[in-house]
Amino acid sequence: MAKRLNNESTVGAVIQQFIEGHRLQSGMDQVNVKEAWANLMGNGVNRYTQNVALKNSTLYVELTSSVLREELSLGKSKIIKMINEEIGRDVVTNVVLR
């Protein structure tokens, strides 16, 4: 049974407790990672991005441009750091570019 909050709880605290209580964090992480990718990479990279998926802390990104894939593969650690900073916690530990 979920813990009852007092009447002075913030909306953010109530939502966070709901997410944790119903085990929705992994789904929220997938949505947050997709939004972070779109925000951080901009229109130039997003134009060549087909799919972004998070599975077990590994970010899978499908790209239509082999040149862009090669260029982004050189900065995987920077991509991981930027996405984790955007989300506010360590969610991504590896990036696979396809």
Image (tube, rainbow, N blue to C red):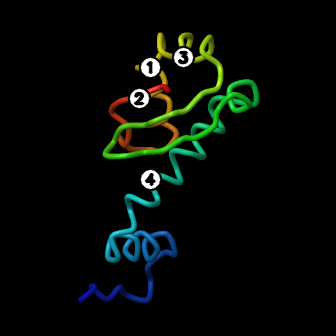
Which callout, 4 or 3, points at the residue further toward the start of the chain?
4
Residue contact between numbered discs 2 and 1, judged by CB atoms under 8 Å: yes
The kind of residue tagged 1 is Lys
Alpha-carbon span between mark 2 and mark 3? 10 Å
Q: Which residue is mark 4?
A: 29
- Residue at coordinates 37% horizontally, 74% vertically from top-left? 17
Disc 2 marks which residue? 95
Q: What residue sits right under mark 1 in the picture?
A: 76
How far separated are the C-alphas under marks 1 and 3? 7 Å
Instruction: Classify 8 as above or below 59.
Output: below
For marks 2 and 3, the one nearer the N-term is 3
Amino acid under disc 2 = Val
Q: Relative to 20, does residue 41 appear above or below in the rendering?
A: above
Identify the residue under disc 3.
72
N-term mark: 4 or 2: 4
Could you classify mark 3 by the number of other residues whose Cα lies within 10 Å: few (under 14), some (14-19), or many (20 or more)?
some
Give the position of the N terminus as an image quadrant.
bottom left
Q: CA distance from mark 4 to mark 1?
A: 19 Å
Please state which amino acid type lies under the numbered disc 4. Asp
Which numbered disc, 2 or 1, marks the residue that appears first in the sequence? 1
Q: Amino acid at mark 3?
A: Leu
Mark 1 vs 3: CB contact within 8 A:
yes
Numbered disc 3: secondary structure: helix
